[in-house]
Image (cartoon, rainbow, N blue to C red):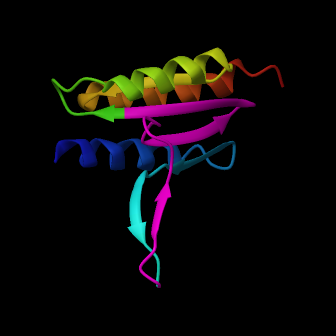
Amino acid sequence: MAEAVYQRLVLGRLEVLRPRVRFWRANTGFARDGRGRGVRFGEPGQPDILGVAAGRGFGIEVKDDGERQRPEQREWQSSWELAGGIYLLAVGKDGALAAVERVRLMLLEAPW
């Protein structure tokens, strides 16, 4: 339950960085369309929040205190970082605030 609270905290804090930061809640799952057909969305292991700041893609995986990444989340992190993206693991309230601060610093470090 606290994970959703931390996600809202991150999203709210990122909101004040607009329009220089573009971000969205990246849901994954399965749903049925109007005809009863199954539709999958998102990628297994992708982080909770995806975005772009200062020309760099970032992903933020939010966890409650004591939670750990699942294997598919670690695999996604590795491939994202290999492609040049920034992956932030935000554990608990302090981790959530630190992730937002890292995104803010990305803007300050931008060469333009």
Image location of residue 94, percent across then percent down: 28, 25
Q: Toward the viewer: 74 or 112? A: 74
| 48 falls in the magenta region | yes
Residue at (45% x, 36% y) in the render: 47
Tell me what residue is drawn at x 34 percent, y 35 percent. 62
- 105 drawn magenta: no
The spot of residue 90 in percent (x, y) is 35, 27
Residue at the (18%, 43%) spot, across then down = 2
Horizontally, residue 13 falls left or right of residue 6, namely right
Q: Of 4 and 101, which appears nearest the observer? A: 4
Number of numbered markers: 0
Q: Quadrant of residue 64?
A: top left
Q: Is residue 70 left or right of residue 42?
A: left
Q: Is residue 70 left or right of residue 87?
A: left
Residue 44 percent across, percent down from the top left: 44, 40
The residue lying furthest to the right in this view is 112
| Magenta region | 35-61
Looking at the image, residue 2 lies above or below residue 91: below
Query: With respect to residue 3, does 28 lie above or below?
Result: below
User: Which quarter of the picture shows residue 56?
Assistant: top right
Who is closer to the viewer here, 34 or 59? 34
Residue at 16% across / 48% down in the picture?
1
Q: Quadrant of the C terminus?
A: top right
Residue 3 in percent (x, y) is at: 24, 42
